[in-house]
Amino acid sequence: MPSDRLITKQSAPAGLYQLVLLKFVRNRVALAGLCCLLLLLLAILFAPQVTPYDPLQKNTPERNQAPSLLHPFGTDKLGRDIMSRVLYGGRVSLQVGFLSVGLAVIISTPLGLLAGFFGGIADNAIMRVMDLILAFPGLILAIWLVSLLGSNINNVIIAIAFFSLPTFSRLIRGVTLSIREMEYVMAARSMGAGSLRIMFFHILPGVLGPMIVLTTLGVSGAIVAGASLSFLGLGVRPPTPEWGAMLADGRNYLRTQWWIAVFPGMTITLVVLILNIIGDALRDALDPNVRA
Amino acid sequence: MSQYILRRIAIAFPLILAVTTVVFVMLRVALPGDPAQIMAGDRASPDQIELIRRKLGFDRPVLEQYFIFLGNFAQGDLGRSVKFREPVMGVIAKAFPFTVTLTFLSVTVGTAIGLLIGIITAIYQRTWVDNFGIVLTVFFFSIPTFWLGLMLILIFSVGLRLLPVQGAGTWRHFVLPVTTLAVGQSALIARLTRSSMIEVLSTDYVRTARSKGLAQRQVLLRHALRNTLIPVITVVGLSVGGLLGGAVITESIFGLPGVGRLAIDAISNRDYPMIQGAVILVAASFVFVNLLVDIIYAFVDPRIRYA
């Protein structure tokens, strides 16, 4: 390679997010995981095109079949194809994962910013409420909420978002506290920027990095929590396919039809594993102490 | 030291009071419709509903109900179970030992294994041992409790016929439930121990210890490990919350008669006093465990006492 080209390449300044992206892409495991996840997402989105079977269609002659070419994941006691149920069930699980974390982020971002930026009474009030929510073990709180509000997917999303609030607002508050003291915030203040402007245009971008990591890990946690609730009979009701509910059904047939419980569980483990690997890789990529 | 401990205890009590208040308010605010009607079921006659309403005190002003509730709670009375027709406290007291045993064993086993993996991977940083450890812990960290439990049953009970599937009679009944919960716990602790240990190993005092000719074993056990443990202890306390939640699932899979299964059964029976009691007691135990951890913390890390 000619030396002058090397120099031009080196002298080009890279933005923070470009560097982060570069570091992330160099992590081959995480990149492969991301590709797998995208493939799975596509399969779930285009489930009607991927699988010829209706997830709710009973087909008694083909019931309790072991995995075969025709039914790669086998069929359940009603002859429903497990693979199509896993794919359609993914819609529910991913919906729960993303919507509950989205809801938690939307509510906790302003709360964390307010607490960290203003301190004092606002900080105390918000953070004591968060401490109170944290006093309950997460899943227990979700079980209690869903049992009160009623078993359906919306209440599952609300319950999971509720117990995730402290984790997110504590992180945002912490980062806000450290950014608040930085010189560029003071510079903005001295140029006459108001509190709202400083919070949303100067502090929020700095919070985004750690938030992305926590959101990725939060989605995997929320998917497991949602499936746990359905597994306990508190989430989505049968016959709607859902990963946790399918496992709850499959536990009764472990002795004879192992595939009913194995495949939905494998899928959920795979999704959670990939999300955790991506989250770890993002954390490493955002950490200036870890070199690419 | 004693002042610090007293201050921690002083914080725990209002927290438990707040927890009970939240649980009380939620039952009356979040429950859509008339609680007496819901508890009585769809087929109950108006007389039956009225009876339940009077029995549970729903006919009185909310504030009065709240004070009665608090007064009873202070005396260890959490109301009567609708299904068992017995005091909630008594029913839970019978189930509590199972949940405590399960959680305690899982924390202990999981933390011990996690520490071991964490220390080994930190010592052999950037070797194949470390890489293998990272893959293993990410995997352990990601398996959902309910699936792991079912797979352990499939392998060890259905396949190899080594261990019983359900029940709580002997120690053999606890092997699979404890393993189910300890796997996730060990991954959590291993990841944390590894990063904490790596940080400690790069400090000046570890280098000093090495440069004065101490054996590797001494450096690791006497100098590095102690400071590695400080963040780990906090997380062990916080992880108990996750394990209590996991215990609900584990108890339900393995048929252990603990508080978690009691709560799940209570939900399907609409036994609200029972659910309420279980939630309060589990949350109170969680607050208590974290109080204990804070106190242990002060013994381990003298810097805390002056903070």
Image (cartoon, grey):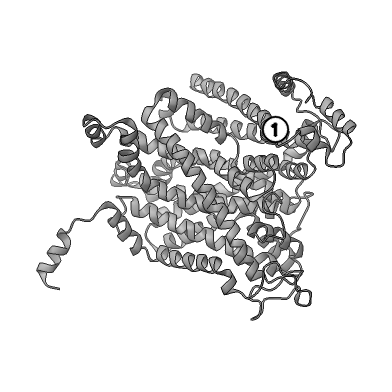
| Secondary element at image label 1 | helix
Q: Visible in this render: residue A31?
A: yes
In front here: B111 or A222?
Answer: A222
Q: Visible in this render: residue B233?
A: no
Q: Residue at x 24, y 34 (%)?
A: A188
| Disc 1: host chain | B
In front here: A190 or A256?
Answer: A190
Measuring from the top left, give residue A185's x and y in whole percent: 26, 35
Measuring from the top left, give residue A97's x and y in whole percent: 54, 53
Image quadrant assignment for residue A202: top left
> Along the horizontal axis of the image, is A246 left or right of B89?
left
Image quarter in which the C terminus of chain B is found: top left
Residue B282 versus residue A120 in the image, above or below:
below
In this figure, which residue is indicated by the disc labeled 1?
B27
Disc 1: CA contacts within 10 A as few (<14), some (14-19) or many (>=20): many
Image quadrant assignment for residue A241: bottom right
Q: Amino acid at mark 1?
A: Leu
In front here: B214 or A26?
Answer: A26
> Along the horizontal axis of the image, is A75 left or right of B187?
right
In front here: A248 or B143?
Answer: A248
Image quadrant assignment for residue A199: top left
Measuring from the top left, give residue A144's x and y in whole percent: 67, 40
Q: How many marks?
A: 1
Q: Residue at x 49, y 57 (%)?
A: B138
